[in-house]
Image: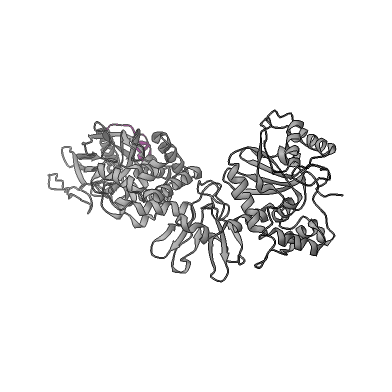
Amino acid sequence: MESFLRRNARGLSFWSRISISVFLAALFVACGDDGASSYDYITSDNPQSSSLVEKSSSSKGSGKKSSSSTTSDKKNSSSSSKIKTLDTSSSQSGDDDLLNVIYAVWESDFSGFVALDEFAKAAKVSIVELDSADDYDETKNVFSSEIGKNGAYEIKKINLVQPYARFTADGKINSVIDGKSAAVTLSTLGDATSGEIFNLNLLTTLESERALQRLAGKNKLSFEAAKSEASESVWNMFHLESIDFDKTETIHVSDISESGAALLAATVLLQAGANGDFAKFFKSVTADVAKNGQWNDSSARIAIADWALSNDLDDGYASIRKTLEKRMTKVADFEKYLKRFYLKELEFPDCAAETAGNVFFVKNKASKFYAAKYDDVSKSKDRFVCNEQKGWTAIPDSLKDFMGQSPTAKDGEVRLGAFSGEFLVYDGSKKTWRKATAVEKDRYFVKTSNIKEFVDIQDVYENIKDDERVIFVLRHAERGDDTSKGGTLTDNGKKQSEEVGARLKKFTEDFVLGASEFLRAHQTVESMAKGRGQSYDKRDTIPQLNDDWYNKDNDAVEKAKNECGGGWEVTSKYAYTGAYSTGANAAYYDLSERSVELIEDVLLKKYTKEKFVLLSSHDKLMVPLVAYCSNLQINLKKYDGGNWINYLAGVAIIVDKDGNRRYIAVRGLKSGFMN
């Protein structure tokens, strides 16, 4: 009978439920063996919190019936809740037993604050009793209180048959991230025996929804255990330990305390993840956590961590603090908890004395700060170093290149600084990196170009990228016997040039033409333009493309030529061995310095934005230039029985949007070498 009545008591009015309790007590008395027996009826899953106490006694032989019942107000150390006595008596004439029923009801005062101070002024807090006998479902015992302008509410002398209640409030909350207003429902769970302050905030809402799941079903927990487990889960969402902070329902975001700072940080983090629609986002997070106590949306967590890291890098959260201080005047030190969240979420290692100086970059591919390796700047240029006093700090731009370079570099090794875009040279004696000279910088381009053979000019031309431009420097086509400046191409030379030009038609953009002071060089680019059907025939004359560009002392060159057996031999020996380029009477300039001067100070300075440039020069310039650009890998060692450069062969200087260069040895004919 008791079980049946208790199961069906849900939904009845408050006073109807009291009547049922009285009836149950009467049944126990009627079934007793002795009118002097006493019975205790427990109506709650917490016998120390909620009980119906029934005592009866009789004095036989006196002709009088007397009853005695006592109870005292009971107050929890942290609550103003009192057990209120309802005394129901019935008597009959004669010696019939007197039945006294005393029913315990909690009379409680509740107060607290709702969310941030901007919570809607007209909102109300609703308090509904929960039935512990029926998976803590809501009863019809409901109370409400209006919320003051600062988010405060208070309601006094609430009568609860059971001490458990759910507090809810519907209203709007303004984001500190974007200032947008969002409609949300906040909630918390309360036990009248354990407290009288019940704040409502984002964390209490997450906690209450998870706790309600643990209060129902086969493996349900007690109210206290469910609340404790849910609280731990919610704090863990933000990489915080619940043991370090007060109960969520006793904290307010304006509290100048560690608990207040942690709550404020969690509130800011949640709002940061909303992406403009906080109501929708918070609803999804609440549902996610309620299922199993885990925040399973990894993409949302990483996005929030990225936001927290970005703001820390920008201004150390100064703008967020300024916004909060306008709303709440005093603000706790919440920043450290924002930082703790992104450090844990993005898997920063521990920073301590033994790891001081260690460098870190984010390895989570979902993060906008991801880098596959230290010098991978395709997604992010942010890098971090462990500072024993300050923890993980951003590496200044001026130091990123140096801190990330491998200490195993060789002396004189040139590398491109991924962050600064500067070229660096390793000084082995000092074990430091310094800015590269123009020649050292170009050595990097030479090595990374890794030229090993001549490539057909058409293939190179047709594979120029949209963000690249190219300067072709070629030896002229087949010439006649006259080697003076007035010497001309042979008919075959003109034909060669036209045929090569005819293969360079993929792009409609005309070539800009240029040549040395020699007629045959002009005839070469003129015929190539004719072959591709190009109407534009204005040609630049560039004296630096003459065949004596590398000559430092013409008399010394003539002397060296006689020693080596000819112009081809001495030119190639100089290019591949450095012969005749040192000392006071040097015949030639330093190969690297003179080549870089031609490329940077002459050609690239003259042609700064032209997409396609076609220039013609001579073998005594082209052999040293090809030798330099190929890092001596293409064999034009005529002095040692090697090859000589063919007509219409040379170098393609390709420049990208950042000014970085790559070199390719090109040929217009079938071979880059003469027969």
Coordinates of residue 651 in the picture (x, y in percent): 71, 47
Query: Is residue 107 shown to the viewer in this render?
Result: no
**Residue at image location 52% in from the left, 61% down from the top:** 402
Looking at the picture, does residue 297 appear above or below residue 372? Answer: above
389 and 108: which is toward the camera? 389
Give the position of the N terminus as an image quadrant: top left
Q: Is residue 396 above or below residue 605?
A: below
- The residue lying at 38 percent from left, 41 percent from top is 271
567 above or below 276?
A: below
Q: Where is residue 334 in the image (x, y as percent from the top left)?
A: 33, 51
Q: Residue at x 58, y 69 (%)?
A: 428
Q: Is residue 110 visible?
A: yes
Q: Is residue 242 above or below residue 538?
A: below
321 or 592: which is nearer to us?
A: 592
Quick check: is 4 in the magenta stretch? yes
On whether residue 232 falls in the magenta region, the answer is no
The stretch of residues the image draws in magenta is 2-13
Whether residue 511 sits left or right of residue 41 in the image: it is right
In which quarter of the view is residue 336 placed? bottom left
Report whether 178 appears left or right of 107: right
Give the camera-side residue of 366 and 93.
366
In the shown orientation, is residue 319 left or right of residue 379? left
